[in-house]
Image (spheres, rainbow, N blue to C red):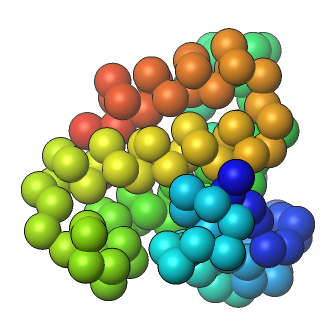
Amino acid sequence: MSSFTEPLTVTKIGSRRWKVERAFRYYVGSENSNVFIEVPQGTTTDFASVPQPFWILFPPDGKYTQAAVVHDLLYGCGGEVLRFYPQYENLSKEEMRKLCDDIFLEAMTVLEVPKWVRKTMYHAVRMFGRFVF
């Protein structure tokens, strides 16, 4: 199973913005795999980018928050942090976006987000993520 190396530690810096105070890694695929995403200290995030009418079911901050921070980092760089790994260096833009979304789903599973929540959030980023990736 994949893993996070540290718990999420953030400071609020705006009405919907937070700053990561302690760097952490997310290992993709399995714990201590050779593929990981480094989330550096100082990374900014809005947590889960859920439209306000849906906050009653999916607030921006929830059990999935650390996965959302990883996903924000991946989307913010267009997945470029993954191109360092040979198996991902030649992916098309759409293949890279799907990989980023799949990592989000996997990370939510690691965080034990209920299946209906993670599936709904995954399908939402698959459907609407193309507009911001």
The answer to whether 100 is drawn above or below residue 108 in the figure is: below
In the image, taking residue 83 as reference, residue 14 lies left or right, namely right
Choose top left, top right, bottom left or bottom right for residue 6: bottom right
Tell how many labels.
0
Compared to residue 52, the image places residue 84 above or below, namely below
Q: Is residue 43 above or below residue 120?
A: below
Q: Is residue 47 shown above or below 36?
A: above
Q: Quadrant of residue 9?
A: bottom right
Q: Residue at x 88, y 66 (%)?
A: 7
Q: Residue 115: tell me if it is visible.
A: yes
Q: Position of residue 91 (x, y in %)?
A: 16, 60
Q: Residue at x 20, y 74 (%)?
A: 89
| Left or right: 102 in relation to 17 | left
Residue 45 at least partly seen: no
Residue 125: x %, y % from top left? 43, 32
Q: Is residue 91 left or right of residue 64?
A: left
As rendered, which of 31 and 102 lies closer to the eye? 31
Residue under the point 29% across and 49% down = 97
Residue 2 x, y percent position in the rendering:
67, 57
Residue drawn at x 75%, y 15% as measured from the top left: 57
Residue 130 lies in quadrant:
top left
